[in-house]
Amino acid sequence: MLNFENTKLRRMVVHQVGNRGKMEGVKYSKTAHTIKDDYVRDLLMMYFTKPFDGNIMYQFRHDADLNLNEVYTYVRKIFEDHNDLYDQSVNIANHLYEKSNHPKIKKGELYIVEFAGCQVDDEICNAVGIFKSENKDKFLKVYQKDDDFEIDFEDGINIHKLDKGCIIFDTERETGCKVVTVDKLNPTGEAAFWKDEFLHLQPIPDDYYLTRNYMEIVKEFSKLHFNPENDVEEFTKDRREQIDFNSKAARYFEEKENFDLDDFASEVIGEPEVVEEFKAFKEGFEDDFKVPELAQSFSLNEDAKKEVSKKFRSVLKLDRNFHLYVHGGSELLEKGYDEKRKMNYYKIFFNEEN
C-alpha cells in the first residue's frame, strides 16, 4: 500500500535526454531546485505520484552483483548524502541516454526528485523519483485584451499523463529497495527498456504478485487446454468442461484464504495427466515471461483476487447475435444440432427469470 498524503517534495533536478540512436544528446540543468510555490509543488506532486497504485512492487537486480546495477548505485548515494542529488542526477541522465537507442524512444525532460515522508505499507521512508515526460499536449488559453477576449494556445505537459516514471523507496536497501514503476505509453514492446534495460528491475514475489500470476496462469491454461477455436478435427472437448473448470477455479480462489498448488490440482483439476500438463504450462509461463519460479503455497491477496476474478467468467459467443455469460451450472446447458435449420443450439434450464 502506498500513501503520499503527507509526502513532501524536497528538491528536484530537470535534464533533457534525447535518443542516442539519433545522436540527440543530453542537456543538463545547472543545479537542483527547491520548489517554493505551494500550488506548483502540489501540481508536481499530483503529476509524479498519482499514477502509482503500489500493487506490484519491484526491486533492483543484477545478474552478477547488485552493486553493479547503475541506477541502484546512483540512488543509494543520494539516500546516503542528500547533497549528492545533482551529481547523481547527471549520472542517471547519462545512463538513460546510453539505453535510449530504439528509434521510437522520444526526447524528453527527465526529473530526478527527492521525496520525504512516503508511506510504504506500514513504514514511513524517504524516496527518490525518476520521471520522464516525452509528449506535449496543446492547451487553449483564453485571456482578456482591452475590451475583448483573445484565444491562443500553448504546448505543455498534461499533469494527468505521466509518460514514464518510477519511485525508489529507501527501504530494504540490501535486497534492492522497494520500487514502483509505470510506463503508460509502452507497457511492453520497444520501450520495455525503461523497466528492463534502464532500471533493471524484477518483481518482488509477495502475495499480491503470486495471486495475480497464478490466476493469470489458470486463465490462460483454460484457454489452451479447452480452446474451442482449435481445429475441429483436433478439438473434441465439450465447452461445458471449460465452464466447469473455470467455475471450480473461480470458486477456489474466492473461498480459500491460502493457495497450495497440490491442493488446487486435487480440487480443481483432478485428472493426473491434466495436472502434469498444468504444471508444465506453469513452467513455460515462468520461462516465457522471465518470472522467477513461483512459490507453491502462499496467502491469497484480496486485491489481486478482485482484479482478476472477472476474467474467469465463461462467455459463449454465438455468432454475432448472442453472448451468454455462464457463472456455473453447466449441467443446465444442453447443446444440440437442428437438422431442419442446419444450425447449432443451446437449451438452457432455469427456475426463475429476474
Image: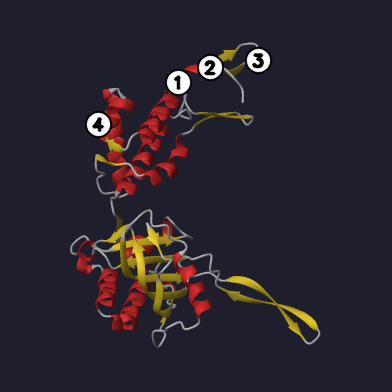
Question: Mark 2 vs mark 3: which is more N-terminal?
Answer: 2
User: How many residues crowd mark 2 within 10 Å: few (<14), some (14–19), many (20+)?
Assistant: few
Q: CA distance from mark 3 to mark 1?
A: 22 Å
To which residue does mark 3 refer? 341
Question: Mark 2 vs mark 4: which is more N-terminal?
Answer: 4
Asked if one can make out residue 25 in the rendered structure from this viewpoint, the answer is: no
- Please tell me the numbered disc located at residue 238: 1
| Residue drawn at the location 39% of the way across and 84% of the way down | 32
To which residue does mark 2 refer? 335
Q: Viewer-proximal residue, 230 or 176?
A: 176
Q: CA distance from mark 2 to mark 4?
A: 33 Å
User: How many residues crowd mark 3 within 10 Å: few (<14), some (14–19), many (20+)?
Assistant: few
Horizontal arrangement in the rendering, residue 156 relative to residue 75 (left or right): right
Q: CA distance from mark 2 to mark 1?
A: 9 Å
- Please tell me the numbered disc located at residue 262: 4
Pointer 2 with pointer 1, Cβ within 8 A: yes
73 w.r.t. 90: above or below? above
Question: Mark 4 vs mark 3: which is more N-terminal?
Answer: 4
Question: Mark 1 vs mark 4: which is more N-terminal?
Answer: 1
Callout 3 amino acid: Arg
| Residue drawn at the location 50% of the way across and 82% of the way down | 37
User: How many residues crowd mark 4 within 10 Å: few (<14), some (14–19), many (20+)?
Assistant: few
Q: CA distance from mark 2 to mark 3?
A: 15 Å
Asked if one can make out residue 57 in the rendered structure from this viewpoint, the answer is: yes
